Image (cartoon, helix red, strand yellow):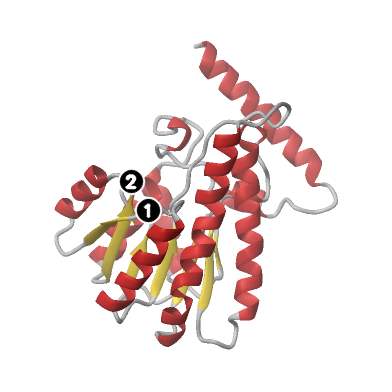
Amino acid sequence: MKLTGNTIFITGGGSGIGCALAEQLHKLGNKVIISGRRKGHLDRVVAANPGMEAVELDVADLKSIQSMASMLIAKYPDLNVLFNNAGIMLPDQAAGAIDEELLTSTVTTNLLGPVRLTSALIDQLKKTKGTVIYNTSVLAFVPLSLTAVYSATKAALHSYALSQRFLLEKSGVRVLEIAPPWVRTDLMNSQEAAEAMPLDEFIAETMQVLGTDADEIVVERAKPLRANPGPSEHAFVNGLNDHMLALFSGAAGA
């Protein structure tokens, strides 16, 4: 992907990976517009990055997506990059009754939101020969049993990206996927997690790969998990989940 001269819209840009990538892309001279539900977070990011803009958006709300898309197309006719980053991650109980509110909000935010927003902006991106980026997760390939619904939404988004990339191959629109490993962000209170990848290291390596022709942006730490699907995938998945259950149980008991 070309890393300069873009007009970029990033959802979930008020914190975590979205914020960090927004700041790096802003420093490279791109026009960056971030969005999110928490105005205070957006205001702090914009204040720290003069020239960046922010708009409030709830990707779980179809009407909000539709009005936002119309505004973006009218105000930013050069818009050529959509980065679907917003997402929520909550622990669930796949071995029992799934909480209906958790199920609905996670699927709506993590899957329906990106699909709907991309759909609303795809004609604009065709005009500008632009790029769609989805932030999925290595959990799309190696699901974490503690967050089964989240993992399933990321697997579905990966599948959708594959289909969309194929269908848009001759349109001039590129479809990219960033599949992060466990990173120190607000998700699951991971800021201090020793086994999680420091955010600055993840961003530096991601920016390096993003600047290539790769369709999937996978840092070195994530590659073993990305390579896992296949006839023997269950052993790896079970081993990872045994380890993570022990890790979280230990943290809870500390």
What residue is drawn where x is 54% and y is 46%?
Answer: 181
- Please give the label number shown on residue 160: none
Is residue 219 left or right of 246 when viewed as pictured? left
Q: Which residue is mark 1?
A: 18
- Residue 168 is situated, as x and y percent measured from the top left of the image, at 58, 81
Q: Amino acid at mark 1?
A: Gly
- Residue 159 is situated, as x and y percent measured from the top left of the image, at 66, 62
- Please give the label number shown on residue 15: 2
Q: How many marks?
A: 2
Q: Quadrant of the N terminus?
A: bottom left
Furthest-right residue in view?
Answer: 231
Q: Are marks 2 and 1 in contact (CB under 8 Å)?
A: yes
Mark 2 lies on a secondary structure that is loop
- In terms of image quadrants, where is residue 161? bottom right
Is any atom of residue 76 visible in this view? no
What residue is drawn where x is 49% and y is 37%?
Answer: 196
